[in-house]
Amino acid sequence: MVETSGIRAAIELTKFRLTGFIALSGIFGHILAAPAPGIDTLVIGAGVWLLAAGAAVLNHIQDRRYDCWFARTRHRCLVKNRVDLQTAGWVASGLVISGLALLAGGLDTHLPWILGILALVCYNGLYTPLKKKTLFAVWPGVICGMLPPAIGWTAVPSSQCHGTGIQLFGVMLVMGIWQVPHFLVLAAAQPVCDPGADRFPTFIRLWTKTELFLQILVWVCVYSLGVFWFLLNGGIVLPGVSASLAGMAFVLPGVMGFFLTRFPAYAGAGGFTTLNLSMLIFMVLGILDRILPTVFPLQ
């Protein structure tokens, strides 16, 4: 029982699903640029996950008094004192140092660990404290979300890089734009009666439900346009993969609009799942686009 609760606390503190997603985006960026996946790809995945997990634990520490005001976060383990604050601090430090050490010592270039520090500054130094004061905190969060694929991409020495700067910008742009409706969908799922809604800046106090839904739909359309732009600039090689991603980008606004108009009570959960699934498809198909030609070379 104690072991099970410890595992649950570790999964919660490290935001395991989210940080796994972030690690995958680092791997995605590396595979897009590298001649072929290798040991460096695994180093990137592990280093990015350790750094992201450490930042997540530090975020829990920073937000422990903030989280108690919201229904979604008031039962977290630091809020309920299920984990000692000092223990969480040591875990955060160990994860961050391990992640940076892996990115600095396990690769031939310096940019990955420098970008890792920049991501840490954006997330824990800017986004986390600013979200308690202003809705503009979303923008440091957007920048932070753009950096993991760049960490993976810049781990490839320039002499061996198979991608172009415009393709790297395209990946970062798609990742960054995706963050905005992601933030808004989380806001849509927040109860208006949350005590924290009156104490801290929230989108549900800035806009009506209809206005918030419209903002989500607009940003989902921009996100889809970003995917099209990435495809038009040669981000994907295989025609079948390119057509699949184009199809996803085309139907995504319609799917999101369906949830927002037909099932407004489930817009948060449905929109959240739709956005996450779309990004997972984007990354997995992008990885397959680079791996399949090496496994099944064209004659």
Image (tube, grey):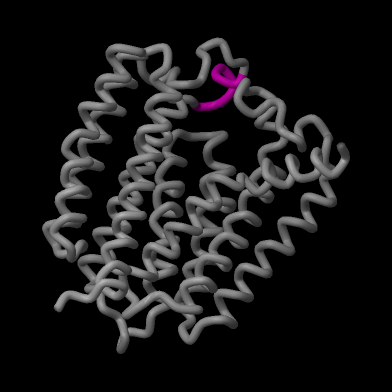
Q: Where residue 68 sits in the image (x, y, percent)?
A: 70, 26
Q: Quadrant of residue 222?
A: top left
Q: Quadrant of residue 26?
A: bottom left
Q: Which residues are magenta?
A: 196-201
* Residue 40 relative to residue 86: left or right: left
* Residue 173 relative to residue 201: left or right: left
Q: Where residue 255 sits in the image (x, y, percent)?
A: 26, 27
* Residue 138 relative to residue 232: left or right: right
In this view, the residue in front, 101 or 39, is: 39
- What residue is at 38 percent from the left and 80 percent from the top? 156
In this view, the residue in front, 289 or 134, is: 289
Q: Where residue 24 sits in the image (x, y, percent)?
A: 46, 57
In this view, the residue in front, 135 or 229, is: 229
Magenta: predominant secondary structure element?
Answer: helix
Identify the residue at the far bottom of this view. Answer: 159
* Residue 62 relative to residue 229: left or right: right
